[in-house]
Image (cartoon, rainbow, N blue to C red):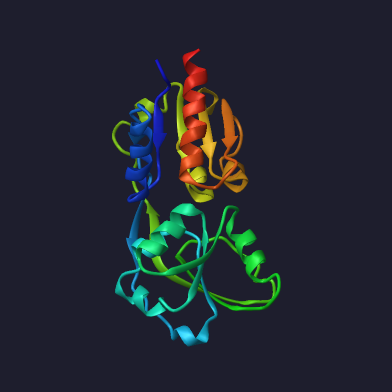
Amino acid sequence: MSLPVIVTRPEPGKAATVARFAALGIAARAMPLFAATPLPWTAPDPGDHDALLLTSAQAVRLAGPDLARLVSLPVHAVGAATAAAAEAAGLTVVAAGAGDAQRVIDAMTSSENPRILWLCGRDRSDLEARGARLSPLPCYTVDPVDPPADWERLVAGPAILLAHSARGAARIAALTEDRRDALALVAISAAAARAAGSGWASVTVTERPDDAAMVTAAVDLCKKGEK
C-alpha cells in the first residue's frame, strides 16, 4: 500500500497537482492550507516599463481585466506553469527560467538595466534588482485557512507532503510539530526545504522548481514505500 500523498497548495494549482497524480494512478489528498484571492490594482502605463516579471501563475489567473493593458510588455516567467498561464492569457513570453525568481532577474539584468514591472502577490520574497528598476505590483493575496477536517488524521502516520513555496513549507512545519519523523516532505526549492525546518523522515528538493518535478519526486517516494 502506497503512502498517502497530501497536496497543500491552494486552488487553482491544487486541482492541477491532484490531476497529475490521478493520471499516474495515485489518489492524492487535497489538503489546502491557503486560499488565493485577487486584490484591487490598476495597471500602470506599459510605456514606463521594459518588461513584465511573473513569478507565479496566480498573478496571471487572478489579475483580472487590467492584465490586458500590459500585453505589449515582454514577459519573463519563473517556471513552465507560469509561462503557460501567461501565453494562455495572450501575453508574449520571451524567457521562462527554470530556476528561481532571482536567477530570472539576474538573466534579465546581465547586459542592461531594464525597468521591470513585477506583477506579484502581497506576500513575496525579497529580490535583488541588480541595478534595474524593479517595481513590485501586488494583484493577489494568498492567506492561511484552517486545515481541512482530515488533516490531523492524515499527518498522524506516515505520509508524503508537498510544499510548493517557502511560506507553504513553514505553515506545514507549524502544523506538524512533534510528528515529522513519520512524514516525508517534497519541497519545490532549497528555500522551501529550509523553511520547513528539521526532524522530517526525509526531505526531497526537486531538481526543477515546478509541479511536474514535485509529482515525480513524490511518486518515487511512493514506490520506495511499497518495497
- Answer above or below: position of 87 versus 146: below
- The image quadrant of residue 97 is bottom right
Residue 74 screen position, x and y as percent? 50, 73
Which residue is drawn at the image coordinates 50% and 50% (left, top)?
167
Residue 77 screen position, x and y as percent? 51, 62
Which residue of the protein is positioned furthest toward the top in this rendering?
227
- Answer above or below: position of 99 versus 76: above
Which residue is drawn at the image coordinates 70% and 70% (left, top)?
110
Residue 22 visible in the picture? yes
Residue 183 screen position, x and y as percent? 50, 27
Of the pair 114 and 163, the residue shown nearer to us: 114
Of the pair 24 and 36, the residue shown nearer to us: 24
In the rendered image, the quadrant that contains the N terminus is: top left
Residue 166 screen position, x and y as percent? 54, 49
So how many labels did they put on this image? Answer: 0
Which residue is drawn at the image coordinates 36% and 69% (left, top)?
90
- Answer above or below: position of 16 versus 152: below
Which residue is drawn at the image coordinates 55% and 24% (left, top)?
181
From the viewer's perspective, tell me whether residue 32 is left or right of residue 218: left
Of the pair 102 and 35, the residue shown nearer to us: 102
Residue 174 visible in the picture? no
Of the pair 136 and 33, the residue shown nearer to us: 136
